[in-house]
Image: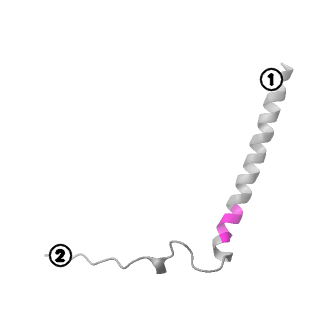
Amino acid sequence: MARTIKLIIILALVAAVAFVIARLRSSTAASAGLDGEGELAGSLDTWPEVPVKQVA
C-alpha cells in the first residue's frame, strides 16, 4: 500500500511539473514570434499570388 501511495505521489508531481512547463511554453510562444527580428515564416507577405478562376 505504501508503494502505491508513493507511486501516485510521484506521478502527480511529474504531471504537475509537465503542466507548468507546458503552461510556460505556451505563454512565451505567443509573443516569441512578435519579438523576433525578420519576417515571420508563413507571413501573408511571402505567399504567392493566387490566380483568379475564369468563369466560362
Q: Residue at 77% across / 44% down in the picture? A: 16
List x then y, in percent, for residue 39: 57, 79
**Tag 2 or tag 1, which sits nearer the N-term?**
1
What is the C-alpha distance between the residues marked 1 and 2?
70 Å
The single residue placed furthest to the top in the displayed view is 1
Number of numbered callouts drawn = 2
Magenta stretch prevailing secondary structure: helix
The residue where tag 2 is placed is 55
Going by the numbered disc 1, the residue's amino acid type is: Thr
Q: Count neighbours of disc 1 (C-alpha within 10 A) and say few if under 14, some if 14 to 19, many if 20 or more.
A: few
Give the vertical position of 4 relative to 33 (above or below).
Answer: above
Residue 4, labelled with which disc? Answer: 1
Q: Position of residue 36 (x, y in %)?
A: 66, 76
Stretch in magenta: 27-32
Q: In the depicted view, which residue is nearer to us: 25 or 36? A: 36
Q: Is residue 14 magenta?
A: no
Say which residue appears at 64% left-offset and 75% top-offset: 34
Type of amino acid at the residue the image marks with label 2? Val
Q: Quadrant of residue 35?
A: bottom right
Quadrant showing the N terminus:
top right
Residue 3, image x, y percentages: 83, 22
Give SS at disc 2: loop
Task: Identify the residue at image location x=83%, y=26%.
Answer: 5
Residue lying farthest to the left in this orientation: 56
- Check the image and report above or below for 23 versus 35: above
Residue 22's spot in the image, x, y percent?
70, 53
Q: Residue at x 65, y 67 (%)?
A: 30
Circles 1 and 2, Cβ within 8 Å, touching? The answer is: no
User: Element under label 1?
Assistant: helix
Quadrant where the C terminus lies? Answer: bottom left
Q: Which mark is residue 35?
A: none
